[in-house]
Amino acid sequence: MLFMASLLVASVVRAESTCYGRFVNPITDICWSCIFPISLGAIPLLSDGQADTPNPASPVCYCPPYRVGLSIGFWEPVRLVDVTRTPFCMVGLGGIQLDPGVYAPRGAQVAHDSQARNSFYQVHWYAHPILKLLEVLLDFPCLEKGSLDLVYLTEVDPLWADDELTAIIHPEVVLFANPIAKAACAVDCIAATAHLPIPFLFWCAGCQGSIYPMDGHVTTHIGGVQASMLLTQRMAAKMHRQLVTWSGAGAAGLCGYYPQPIMDKSQYKTQMVYPIPSTQKHGGTCCQPFGRSTIVWGAGKEFPVTGEDFAYQIFRKRNCCASWYSN
């Protein structure tokens, strides 16, 4: 709270040479077909050919003490993520750079030889319930309430820049630092590219690499799109582990959100909104599940200077017991 208060009184400056970004335009930058599939119980109403997670079987639901409704499933745009080289550069907020007077390491790419590179980025996690912000479906009780809010900055998190310190809240990392665990991520890559990632392979980020260590270091940097997608997944997993973000999918989510310390990555998909909004469909959709290969949809999305930082709109699966009465 003290740090957020300091942000309010800190001077806001535009660093033309290092900080770039753009406010998300809901008309031109958001691919609204990403809210599909929409389901009633286990019956798909609108799918647009997109993959979906399992839904409750019955179209009728009940929530204590006396709420009866319809079991609705959809993918809600709820979060926005910045992945940036410049500390306190708000990519998704128009490219403004905050100056709170706090030191944070800058992003970098380091080449070890002609074959291998690693990188480091800072990440920002915003609450961005855009449907509610646009006052769409005003009487629909299943939309996440709230407003645009900066929830988490890695610049003030000492765990984000240190592989050893991050093991404090992720001690299980030692279980996955072996060839067998890493080889399993190839299977997750195939599954995510063809359909959806495999939830029980929670240590894998599909084609992007490993969720661990859950910090800003990318040990195998193939490109900015690949690295930024990997860190987006790590940030989502970190928010779940720290109970900042809860799940609302499946039968357990019909009556409200519930904690999910180990993220079910199949409940998320992303859409790039900066530097080039991904509004063109690739393989039938302009949103990509966690872990899907970036080879096709990521081509041409990174370019020098103004195109080396990234912002993604996050869609999260929601199952809800929609009723005319909400207690």
Image (cartoon, helix red, strand yellow):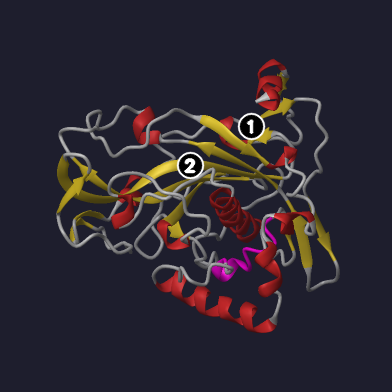
Kindly report the distance in space between the C-alpha atoms of the residues bearing marks 1 and 2: 18 Å
Which residue does the image show at 80% across and 30% down from the upper left? 102
Task: Residue under label 1, please give it.
Answer: 95
Residue 97 visible in the current orientation: yes
Q: Amino acid at mark 2?
A: Arg
Q: Main secondary structure of the magenta part?
A: loop
Task: Residue under label 2, please give it.
Answer: 79
* Residue 315, horizontal then vertical, whole percent: 41, 48
Disc nearer the start of the sequence (1/2): 2
- Image quadrant occupied by the N terminus: top right
Q: Amino acid at mark 1?
A: Gly
Which residue does the image show at 63% across and 32% down from the upper left? 95
Q: Tag 1, which secondary structure?
A: loop
Q: Is residue 16 above or below residue 197?
A: above
The extreme right residue here reads 112
Which mark identifies residue 74? Answer: none
